[in-house]
Image (spheres, helix red, strand yellow):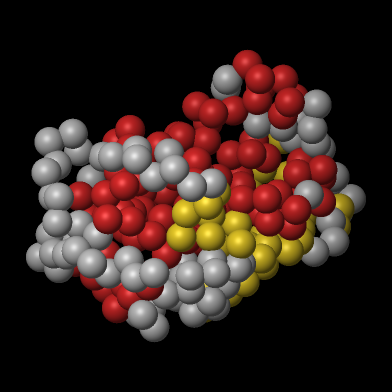
Amino acid sequence: MSYTKGIIDPNQYPLTTRYLANLPAGLDSYTDCLVKTDVHDNIRKIWPQNDSDNNLPPILLSYINNTYQEEWYPDVAGCTLLMMLRDKVFSTDSEAVNWVNNNMESIYKRPMYRMLMLVLSPSLIALGATKRWAAFHRGSTLTAGPIVRDKDGLATTDLTLIFPAYLFNEMHVRQYAAAYCTALRNTRGQNPQVFLNGYSSTEAKYIASWKD
């Protein structure tokens, strides 16, 4: 199935166009890489209401219009929508990253999630990183190294995200760092930090730290 029917105007979406140009087949790339459809639901909340670009590829329009019905969504399309928001709504990558942070904070403040997170420790979040990523993504992997604690009780672990070439650009991997840090911040841990410690076309490395 081809997703390239339709037009993404490079003048209106210059960063999106650059993202897709780095992929081997544009929007049709990496069809085995998928994301749970509800992961990007907040895109619709911030999408400009007066937008009338009906010439976009149907795989994108169906998500924006909330008519996409499948459980899994192409990860390239999800990343493309994030880049389109960057072109249309945010002035900088940092604004786009902060938006993810604020979204996650609002989710964790819901009573059901708040009660769940309060009984978790950051260590449990780190130990479960691989399984949690796999529950929401296919075709990419997140692995966590051993947790090391210093004499002052500071815990650190390395995280490595592996993905096909340029599926995630640097903005995307910074957004994932923000989401992960927000999860740690809403547990019983203290002063959690997640830093992007390296990025290449196929890999992102993070360092996460906290005090239990």
Residue 188 at what x, y percent from top left?
Answer: 76, 30
Q: Quadrant of residue 28?
A: bottom left
Q: Quadrant of the C terminus?
A: top right
Vertical order, 125 against 203 (above or below): above
The picture places residue 29, in percent across and down from the top left corner, at 42, 75
Residue at the top extreme of this rendering: 111
Residue 190 at x, y = what percent? 72, 35
User: Residue at 19% across / 63% down in the picture?
Assistant: 6
Q: In the rendered view, would you say 203 is above or below 117?
A: below
61 is higher (above) or lower (below) than 143: above
Residue ranking furthest to the front: 1
Which residue is more in the foreground, 167 or 173?
167
In the shown orientation, is residue 189 left or right of residue 24? right
Query: For the N terminus, which image quadrant?
Result: bottom left
Residue at the spot 81% in from the left edge and 51% down from the top edge: 127
From where the camera sits, is residue 98 visible? no
Q: Which residue is at a point 33% across and 75% down the rendered structure image?
A: 26
Name which quarter of the figure residue 56 lies in: bottom left
Judging depth in this view, the residue of 153 and 139 nearest the camera is: 139
In which quadrant of the rendered view does residue 160 lie? Answer: bottom right
The reply to whether residue 7 is visible in this rendering is yes
Residue 132, horizontal then vertical, whole percent: 70, 49
Instruction: Give me the residue at 13% from left, 50% from top.
Output: 53
Task: State the residue lying farthest toward the bottom.
Answer: 24
